[in-house]
C-alpha cells in the first residue's frame, strides 16, 4: 500500500498552472511533465532583510535577473509526483531498478520512518566500489542499476582527473543527492520565480490586478501557448521581455573592495551550500558540507581551495553530472590576520621525494590507516595546506606504503596558461572551525562558473 506522502506533487497546481499558461511548462502526461530549461538556474535576489554584518552592499530593489539564462528554449523532463518511480529515474536509476526501489519504499513499515533518498543510497552502497582508473567503474554502476545517461556523464573523459580524486560510490551519491535536492526544492524555487516575474512586470507597467499582463512592454498580452506545438517551449526571457538587471547575489566578479582577506573557494550545488550559509543572518555551519574520507582526514571535514580554477573544475563536473541543478562557486573571505595566527602544516607532493609528509598523510587518510605518533603530532594543527591527490595508478587501500604514491597522482588545472597542482585547505582543529564560522560570518558570496 503506497504511503500517503507518495502523492505529493513536485510542483503545486497553482505554480504549474502559472507556467503552463505562459508556455514555460507542459501539462503532466504519463506522470511526467516538461518545463523550459530557462527556469534553471533560479533568478537570484538578495535576502528580504539584508544582514547588518554583511560586508557586501545590497540593492534595495531587485528586478528579475535572467542574465544567466540561455536564449534557446530547451526542455527538461521532470516527474509529476515527488515520491515516485519517475523520481528514482530522475535521480539516475534505470527503470527496472527504480521500480524495485519504489517497491521497497512503499512496503517499508511506516513506523520505521522510511526516507526516500536513503533507499537510493543503500542501493549504491550494496555494490562493490570502484576507486582507481583500472577498476571497473561501469560495471559498478551497472550493478547498482544506474542509467546509461548518468554512467556516461560520470565517465566523461574530460573529467577523468577530477573523477579520480574520489570513488565511484562518492560520485554516484553526490549526483543522486544533487538531483533529489533539486527536485525537492523545485516548488519553492519556481514559486519565487513566479512572484519575481509578477513583481517585475508590476514595476514595468503598474497595471491593475485585473489586467496584469506578462507580455513584453509595449506589446499586448499573449494568449496561452500550446506547449505541444512545433514551436516548442518558450524561454523565461520571452516571458519577462526586458533586459536583465545586475544581480546582487550571484555575479561573475570577485569582490575587489575588501582588503585584508584571502578568498577560499568551493564548487557545487547552490542547494547544498545554502544549507551551510544562512543569507539572512550570515551564519556559517561547516559540518553541513563536510565529507570524508579525503586526502587529509579519514573523518568528515570541509575542503577549500585558494584557486578559483580548482573550484571551477569541480563545479563543471557537477554541472555535467546533474545538468538541472543550480551549480555555483562559493567564495569565503577569510581575515588574513587570523590566518597568520593559526598553526599550519604544508603538505606538498614534491618530485623525487617518495617519503614526503604529503604522501604519508594521503596514504593514511585515503586508506583509513592510523598515522604514527610523530607524524600525527606534526599534522595536528589548525589548518592543513597542500596538494589534492588523485588515484590514477592504484587504490590507496592496495598500496604497500606512501612511496607507492607518485608525483603524477596530484590533480592539476591550468592557471595563467600553465598546468598547476591543485591546492586545498582543511581547518582541522575544532577551535579553528569555530573561529572560521565566527570570523567569516556574513563574508560568503556566490558567483557563476568561469567560462
Image: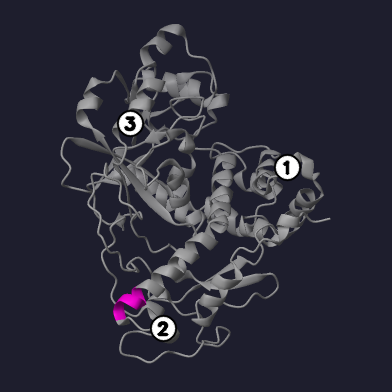
- Asked if residue 174 can be seen in this view, the reply is yes
Left or right of 332 in this view: 30: right
Q: Position of residue 298 (x, y in %)?
A: 51, 24
How busy is the neighbourhood of tag 1: few (under 14 within 10 Å), some, or many (20 plus)? few
- Which element is circle 3 on? helix
User: Residue sitting at 59 percent across and 59 percent down?
Assistant: 149
Label located before the other in sequence (1 or 3): 1
Specify how the rendered protein is coloured: one colour
Label located before the other in sequence (2 or 3): 2
- Which residue position is annotated with label 1? 113
Front position in the image: 292 or 26: 26
Front position in the image: 274 or 389: 274
- Which residue position is annotated with label 2? 212
Query: Is residue 346 shown above or below 140?
Result: above
* Residue span colored magenta: 200-204
Q: Nearer the viewer, mark 2 or mark 3?
A: 2
Amino acid at each position: 500500500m503506497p504511503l500517503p506522502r507518495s502523492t505529493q506533487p513536485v510542483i503545486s497546481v497553482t505554480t504549474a498552472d502559472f507556467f503552463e499558461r505562459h508556455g514555460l511548462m507542459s501539462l503532466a502526461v504519463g506522470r511526467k511533465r516538461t518545463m523550459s530549461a530557462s527556469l534553471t538556474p533560479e533568478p537570484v535576489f538578495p535576502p528580504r532583510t539584508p544582514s547588518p554584518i554583511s560586508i557586501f552592499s545590497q540593492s534595495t530593489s531587485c528586478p528579475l535577473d535572467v542574465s544567466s539564462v540561455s536564449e534557446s528554449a530547451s526542455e527538461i523532463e521532470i516527474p509529476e509526483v515527488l515520491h515516485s518511480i519517475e523520481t528514482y529515474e530522475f535521480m539516475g536509476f534505470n527503470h527496472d531498478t527504480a521500480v524495485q526501489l519504489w517497491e521497497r519504499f512503499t512496503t517499508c513499515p511506516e513506523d520505521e520512518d522510511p526516507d526516500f533518498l536513503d533507499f537510493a543510497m543503500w542501493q549504491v552502497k550494496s555494490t562493490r566500489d570502484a576507486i582507481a582508473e583500472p577498476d571497473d567503474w561501469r560495471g559498478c554502476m551497472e550493478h547498482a542499476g544506474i542509467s546509461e545517461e548518468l554512467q556516461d556523464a560520470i565517465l566523461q573523459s574530460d573529467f577523468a582527473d577530477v573523477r579520480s580524486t574520489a570513488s565511484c560510490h562518492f560520485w554516484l551519491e553526490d549526483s543522486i543527492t544533487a538531483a533529489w535536492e533539486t527536485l525537492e526544492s523545485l516548488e519553492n524555487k519556481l514559486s519565487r520565480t513566479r512572484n519575481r516575474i509578477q513583481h517585475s512586470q508590476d514595476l514595468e507597467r503598474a497595471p491593475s490586478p485585473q489586467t496584469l499582463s506578462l507580455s513584453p512592454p509595449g506589446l499586448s498580452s499573449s494568449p496561452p501557448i500550446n506547449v505541444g506545438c512545433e514551436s516548442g517551449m518558450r524561454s523565461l526571457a520571452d516571458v519577462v521581455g526586458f533586459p536583465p538587471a545586475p544581480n546582487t547575489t550571484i555575479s561573475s566578479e570577485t569582490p575587489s573592495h575588501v582588503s585584508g582577506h584571502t578568498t577560499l573557494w568551493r564548487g557545487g550545488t547552490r542547494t547544498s551550500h545554502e544549507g551551510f550559509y544562512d543569507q539572512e543572518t550570515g551564519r556559517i555551519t561547516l559540518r553541513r558540507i563536510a565529507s570524508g574520507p579525503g586526502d587529509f582526514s579519514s573523518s568528515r571535514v570541509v575542503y577549500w581551495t585558494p584557486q578559483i580554477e580548482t573550484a571551477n573544475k569541480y563545479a563543471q563536473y557537477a554541472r555535467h553530472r546533474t545538468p538541472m541543478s543550480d551549480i555555483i562557486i562559493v567564495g569565503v573571505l577569510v581575515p588574513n590576520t587570523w590566518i597568520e595566527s593559526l598553526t599550519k602544516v604544508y603538505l606538498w607532493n614534491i618530485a623525487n621525494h617518495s617519503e614526503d609528509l604529503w604522501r604519508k598523510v594521503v596514504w593514511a587518510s585515503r586508506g583509513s590507516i592510523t598515522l604514527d605518533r610523530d607524524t600525527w603530532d606534526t599534522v595536528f594543527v589548525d589548518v592543513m595546506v597542500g596538494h589534492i591527490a588523485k588515484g590514477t595508478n592504484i587504490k590507496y587501500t592496495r598500496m604497500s606504503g606512501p612511496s607507492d604514491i607518485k608525483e603524477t597522482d596530484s590533480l592539476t588545472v591550468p592557471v595563467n596558461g600553465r598546468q598547476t597542482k591543485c591546492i586545498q585547505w582543511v581547518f582541522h582543529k575544532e577551535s579553528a572551525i569555530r573561529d572560521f564560522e565566527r570570523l567569516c560570518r556574513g563574508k560568503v558570496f556566490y558567483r557563476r562558473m568561469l567560462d
